[in-house]
Amino acid sequence: MPLGTVYPSESHISYDPRTGVAIRQVTSFAANHHHPFYYIPAYDDSGKRLFFVSHRTGEPQIFFEDEPGGNLVQISHRPDLNEWSCHPSWDGRYAYYTAGNAAWRVDIEAMREEQVATFGGMPIRQPGMVGASMGTTSLSTDNRWWCVYVKAKYQFQMHIIDVPTGQDTVILECDTIAHPQFHPDDASLLRYAGPHDQRIWTIHRDGSNNRLVYHRDAEKKEWIVHETWLPGTREIISSNWPHGVMAVNIDSGAVRWIVRTNAWHPMVNRAGTQLVADTTNPDVGLILCDPHQECGPVESLCDSNASSLGSHWQSDHCPYDDGSVEVYAPQHTHPHPNFSPDGRRVVFTSDQSGWAQVYEVVIPIK
């Protein structure tokens, strides 16, 4: 279907039988759906547009829900879309994504696709389901800088695109680059993921000061995974799977524990005052806590009832330390919770119906 195709609302409300909170199912069509990756915004700054990927046309395409409970609008029409690259602009004017061997955006008001950069003859996304194979991208909160990583021959390249001018600069080449993210308060600073044994890195936007900021305990086979910035600080939050969530100060190297439970994909609201995470092995639903407290109280938000596939997550240490791992972990089976801009709602994905659908839950006011 062409850009701008409008579908009627599929929204309906149910209630979590355990916590009693209202859960709004955003999509209902018999196909797989998911919102952007857990640390990438699913909403524009106004909170009126909720972005997601739908396979209802037979191929993954980008959509948004126009106002909560409103119509669904298709904004991409490509056979080669990298579905995990989607990043809405913070002001809601564009949606950025990669497809084939190029980087694109769609002007949502004009419903016009625009090429932002091209990366030669190699397709951007590599085979696989996790890490570097996902092809996630990051847009700075001032909407100026876009970070895209690509595989070039035997190494990955990190590209920084100056969106207004189109200037594309390679700032880093190394063996592994995954899940880059601009600091929400500083567009000159990014974090990214390296290999499992040297996971948390930071780099300046000009390519300087590339450094490993957390040295894991190799004897314990620590599994450091699923990072995000804590807004208003110089800390990176990460799951130390399955033992809990920790925060690492990138300047001092100081480490503190936020929660000691099996929090899987931790994400923080834009004010930096609340953390949400999904859980698995065991799945006790979505949980909330204060990211500034050390092992403070944990609240239950709701059950996701997602299948959360990936047998390697059953390990009590990093399985990659034991040798090569054959991973089967379809990402649309993972909840990946994230906050709305005002921090009052949480979006997540669940395949509880047999198809992955997008859901939204309102956080109860205390």
Image: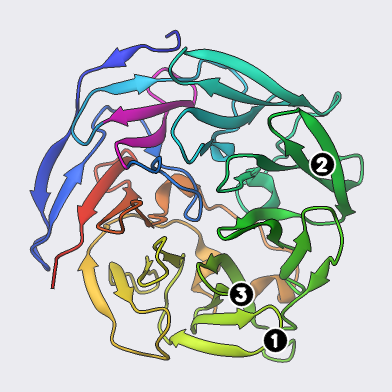
Please state the horizontal and vertical placement of residue 197, each as a whole percent of the image.
76, 74
Q: Work out which quarter of the rendered image holds the C terminus and state it.
A: bottom left
Image quadrant in which you'd find residue 137 = top right
List the residue tagged with mark 2: 151
The residue positioned 45% from the left and 19% from the top of the image is: 58
Which image quadrant for residue 256?
bottom right
Estimate the spatial distance between the alpha carbons at disc 2 and disc 1, rounded to whole Å.
30 Å
| Residue positioned 64% across, 39% down in the render | 144
Three-letter amino acid code at disc 2? Lys
Disc 3 residue type (three-letter)? Arg
Check disc 1 and report the residue beneath it.
Answer: 253
Q: Is residue 289 left or right of residue 161?
A: left
Q: Is residue 132 left or right of residue 342?
A: right
Circle 3 SS class: loop
Residue 258 on image: x %, y %:
45, 84
Picture coordinates of residue 288, whole percent (x, y): 30, 73
Residue beneath disc 3? 234
Q: Amino acid at mark 1?
A: Gly
Secondary-structure class at tag 2: strand
How many residues crowd mark 3 within 10 Å: few (<14), some (14–19), many (20+)?
some
